[in-house]
Amino acid sequence: MLTQKEIFATIEMIDRQHLDIRTVTMGISLLSCCDADARKACDKIYDKITRCAENLVRVGRDIETEFGIPIVNKRISVTPMALVAAASETEDYVPFALALDRAAKTCGVNFIGGYSALVQKGMTAADEKLIRSIPEALDRTELVCSSVNVGSTRAGINMDAVALMGKIIKETAERTKDRDGLGCAKLVVFCNAVEDNPFMAGAFHGVGEAEKVINVGVSGPGVVYHALQSVKGASFDVVAETVKKTAFRVTRMGQLVAQEASRRLDTPFGIVDLSLAPTPAVGDSVARILEEMGLEVCGTHGTTAALALLNDAVKKGGVMASSSVGGLSGAFIPVSEDEGMIAAAQSGVLTLDKLEAMTCVCSVGLDMIAVPGDTSAETVAAIIADEAAIGMVNNKTTAVRLLPVPGKQVGDSVEMGGLLGSAPVMPVHGESSAAFIRRGGRIPAPLHSLRN
């Protein structure tokens, strides 16, 4: 039974420490919508999404009101669209994105993810059509998010896809230059993408999932930061225990919301993703947690070790609170969405190279990083390749969400608003990687991928 002290502690976490449910995401299988006629397929897609998710937003708001727990986003993820569109006899995949956008607006959700392709070992004709349509699709839609998986520990890295994604990111930035390349904020390139991720822009509904499912993403950087303030100067053993206990409480709240949403929507409960997802709000920062451990500025020596401790302790605390922990689960380090990361990048202490090192031990990868608009497609591709290699060799999910902002240079900043925040434009290495990227082919999987 909950004690009065525990109830008051939870209320304080919500009111003063930025604790919230970051997203309730409904995953929907669209495999039943395949049709040789693209127009009929789009109609089926719209009808199925609006039928399955018609009550998602209302139920989310009802739970917020009844339980007093903020639910920031209500979202939808769908089967990777390249798989669904492959059955249609068409060269133009943009109408599929428009159907997703229209359905998302009808349902009233914040975003819909799944305009995606899985090409870690090679590209089908449908995969290539979808990938080449991404810039136009993200330009012409508001709520659609896109992802492409270019590598895995079992398959290696598809360098042809990596090279193509460098060009696609640049083209997406150019097509949305009137919005400072905002389209790139809705496009992520993965290695080892997971099928039950509720967070955007990388969410999609995996083919191994049920017909529909509810996945919940919680968030509590502010709660962890507050907890660590009570153990100033204590050993790292105490720090780890404090983070674990805090993650346990946060995850229990997420499980409560997930189970309630599942019951009310008559949809199976999938997972709770207990990732610490920051916001631009002061006091809701992963960087400030790392600094609370004793770093003067996030990005200085010791940052990677501090992040490793944080990520591990969050996972350990979360798995004790729920038997259904999944998604990515750990700590996110998106520069533009974290007030402390923004400050560290502006000061010059936090660099792209240091962020890459940090991604070896955190949940995802190089996230929401603005770079100069004249960064070449080959350099973008090389950054993707480096990050994919980290994921492949370490058997973990890594990703790149990079914004080459048209017309911007180092020292400038880009304002995206809302949870996307603002990003200082960070420098990249000027030396060329073009000859490396032009080699193409596939970087083989590491030896330890042979586990059978």
Image (cartoon, helix red, strand yellow):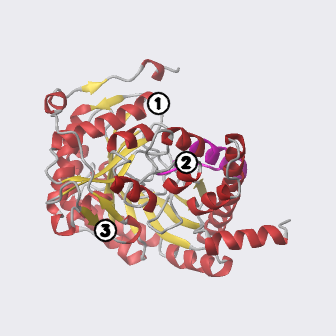
Q: On the picture, is 278 further left or further right than 406? A: right
Residue 154 visible? The answer is yes
Residue drawn at x 58%, y 63% as measured from the top left? 222
Kindly identify which residue carries mark 3.
416
Few, some or many C-alpha atoms within 10 Å of disc 3 (few <14, some 14-19, many ≥20)? Answer: some
Residue drawn at x 47%, y 45% as measured from the top left? 194
Q: On the picture, is 47 further left or further right than 137? A: right
Residue drawn at x 62%, y 81% as measured from the top left? 65
Q: Which residue type carries mark 1? A: Asn
**Residue 267, x across and y down, in percent:** 58, 63
Q: CA distance from mark 2 to mark 3?
A: 25 Å
Q: Which residue type carries mark 2? A: Gly
Task: Kindly check if marks 2 and 3 are in contact, taking CB atoms under 8 A apart as contact.
Answer: no
Q: Earlier in the sequence, mark 3 or mark 1?
A: 1
Where, quadrant-wise, is the N terminus in this rendering?
Answer: bottom right
Highlighted magenta segment, given as a residue range: 311-332
**Residue 429, x across and y down, in percent:** 22, 39
